[in-house]
Every structure is written in C-alpha cells, then in structure tokens.
C-alpha cells in the first residue's frame, strides 16, 4: 500500500516510532504494544525501543512527571491522576514517584477547594453536586466533603 512504512525493518519501525511520538508523547509500553499490533518482530521492536530510550525520545519518568504536574495544574485529584497514568501503562514505581513529586506536599482538601472554583455550595443539593464533581475529578470522598463544608463556612 503506498505511503505505508514497512515495519518489518528496523528503519521502518524506527520511522513509525518517531512519527507516533511526534503526534503524542507515549510510554515505552504503549509504543511496544503499537509495534506488536503492527506485526513488528520482538527483536526489531526491542532494538527500536532501546534506541528511542537511548536518544531520549522515550522516557517513562519524564512522561509520568509531565502528566502528574498537568493534573495538579488543572485541579484534578491524585486518584484521577494515578488511574490515568496507570492506564497509560507506565510502571507502578514510576507512577508512584511522579505522583509523590506532584502531589506530595499538597493538602488534598486545599486542592479540592481550589477545584471547586465558584461552584455554589449553599444548599444540600448543590453541596452533593459539588462533592460528586470533586469525586469525579479524583478526590477522596472525605476530602471532597471537607472542601464543600469549608467552602460553605467562608
């Protein structure tokens, strides 16, 4: 098929990896899975992945750190970040380190209050909605309710 890269060769698989990473930052496991789905032999895939890691194109720790910091900046809770990072097939130790770096010194209730923004919490219905909103964003139910109650007391 014209325009398709021959992935049976190391150079074809390397081109595929570079193009794939240009479109979206990915974990080592995500790239390995893509190569396997496209029929790249394990030997060719291992060589291409090793080269991409050596050249700095693939870095699970950096990816996990960027994603975790992004979740903090956008007001998401640690649980949501952890779920997403694990779904991206990042190693558990890398995920734990990135989450600790991003969330370690932060108080979950304070972060949850910030995520509430200007949401109303002046009656029971709005408080339940606000707590549900925070739970969907990855905050524990205890932190969500503390944030909602603290917001009401201001």
Image: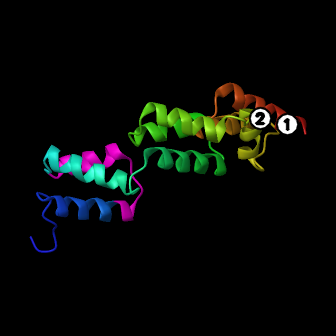
Q: Residue at coordinates 75% horizontally, 49% vertically from top-left? A: 117
Determine whether the residue tagged by mark 2 lies in a helix, strand or loop. Answer: helix
Whether 25 is among the magenta residues is yes
In which image quadrant can residue 79 be found? top right
Q: Quadrant of the C terminus?
A: top right
Say whether residue 35 is left or right of residue 72.
Answer: left
Q: Residue at coordinates 26% horizontally, 46% vertically from top-left? A: 32
For the residues marked 2 and 1, what is the alpha-carbon distance in whole angstroms? Answer: 6 Å
**Where does the image place residue 57, in percent across and percent down from the top left?**
39, 57
Q: Nearer the viewer, residue 47 or 78?
A: 47
**Where does the image place residue 45, in percent across and percent down from the top left?**
20, 49
Say whether residue 108 is left or right of residue 42.
Answer: right
What residue sits right under mark 1 in the picture?
Answer: 152
Q: Nearer the viewer, residue 106 or 62?
A: 62
**Where does the image place residue 84, in percent across and percent down from the top left?**
47, 41
Q: Which mark is residue 148?
A: 2
Q: Residue at coordinates 55% horizontally, 35% vertically from top-left? A: 97
Is disc 2 in contact with disc 1, using a CB cutoff of under 8 Å?
yes
Q: Residue furthest right?
A: 154
In which image quadrant can residue 68 be found? top right
Q: Residue at coordinates 24% horizontally, 65% vertically from top-left? A: 15
Q: Quadrant of the N terminus?
A: bottom left
Could one spot residue 133 in this view of the protein?
Answer: no
Say whether residue 122 is left or right of residue 32.
Answer: right
Residue range (magenta): 21-38
**Where does the image place residue 46, in percent across and percent down from the top left?**
22, 46
Q: Which mark is residue 112?
A: none
Q: Nearer the viewer, residue 81 or 12?
A: 12
Whether 10 is among the magenta residues is no
The chief SS type of the magenta part is: helix
């Amino acid at each position: 098929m014209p325009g398709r890269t021959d992935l049976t060769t190391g150079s074809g698989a390397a081109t595929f990896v570079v193009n794939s990473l240009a479109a979206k930052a990915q974990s080592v496991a995500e790239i390995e899975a893509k190569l396997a789905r496209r029929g790249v032999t394990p030997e060719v895939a291992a060589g291409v992945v090793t080269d991409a890691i050596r050249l700095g194109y693939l870095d699970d720790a950096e990816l996990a750190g960027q994603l975790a910091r992004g979740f903090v900046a956008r007001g998401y809770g640690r649980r949501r970040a952890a779920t997403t990072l694990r779904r991206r097939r990042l190693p558990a130790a890398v995920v734990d380190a990135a989450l600790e770096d991003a969330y370690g010194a932060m108080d979950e209730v304070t972060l949850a209050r910030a995520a509430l923004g200007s949401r109303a919490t002046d009656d029971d219905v709005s408080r339940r909605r606000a707590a549900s909103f925070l739970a969907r964003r990855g905050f524990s139910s205890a932190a969500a309710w503390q944030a909602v109650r603290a917001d009401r007391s201001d």
